[in-house]
Image (tube, rainbow, N blue to C red):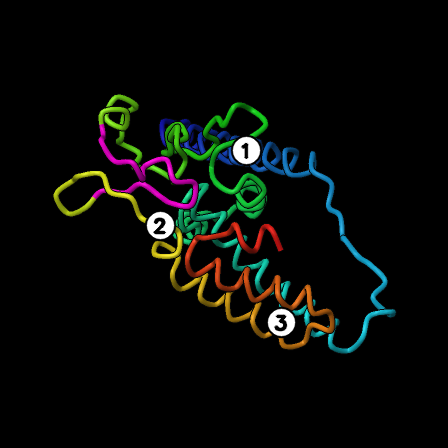
Amino acid sequence: MKKIVVLFLLVSLVACGTQTEDKKKNLYMDKVNQFASFTLSSDISDLSDSQKEMLKLFFEAADIMNELFWIEAYGDPTPLLDTIKDESLKSFIRINYGPWERLEGNASFVKGIGPKPAGANFYPSDMTKEEYDAWDNPEKNDQYSLIRRNNEGELIVVPYHEAFREQVTRASELLKKAAVLAEDEGFRKYLLLRAEALLTDNYQASDMA
């Protein structure tokens, strides 16, 4: 009789655990379904062959910018996503660019991950406002930079073109390839200036163009 009772309890615990997991999966599925999937399309039949080739290059560059946005908002998502089996939870993380729900005040929705750092991944997560205010560095407010710590734990400014050297170099090369294909002289000039700006963080000339 005791064996039957113990077996019943074990089965009940497993069933409860399964129901809890199912509820979580349904919760994330419901949250994902709150966002409508949409395919952005356009008729490009009027574009020349060169312009169509340019579009491919722009899409590649856009993918790189998306990669950089992930780094700025959270960091490399691969280690986090690799630990999660629930596909609906993975999808919800991708929608929010991290484990914090943007439409709910950036509340954490992944177990073991605390509140979103106030400065996302632009600043060290352990940096306080007081430490930042007391830091005497005229470059700390530069809009094209990250704040990091050196080996001694001191705050340092890292310009985008250094922090993202690999990515911006690839994106710059893509824009230069597109410039070769450009049929409009003004657009060609803009692409070349933008390609250079990615490598220097000096965007004024390309903004004016």
Name the residue type under label 1: Lys
Of tags 3 and 1, the one toward the viewer is 3
Span shown in magenta: 135-149
> Circle 1 sits on which residue?
24
Name the residue type under label 2: Pro
> Circle 2 sits on which residue?
159
Name the residue type under label 3: Ala
Cβ–Cβ under 8 Å for marks 2 and 3: no
Residue 5, image x, y percentages: 41, 27
Res 28 quadrant in image: top right
Residue 163 vs 144, above or below: the answer is below
Please indicate whether residue 3 sits to the left or right of residue 14 in the image. left
> Circle 3 sits on which residue?
179
Task: Say what secondary structure mark 1 lies in.
Answer: helix
Of tags 2 and 1, the one toward the viewer is 2
Instruction: Estimate the spatial distance between the alpha carbons at disc 3 and disc 1, rounded to whole Å.
Output: 49 Å
Res 167 quadrant in image: bottom left
Residue 132, image x, y percentages: 27, 28
Residue 209, image x, y percentages: 62, 55
Question: Is residue 105 part of the magenta span, yes or no?
Answer: no
Report how many numbered discs are placed on residues in the image: 3
Residue 37, image x, y percentages: 73, 46
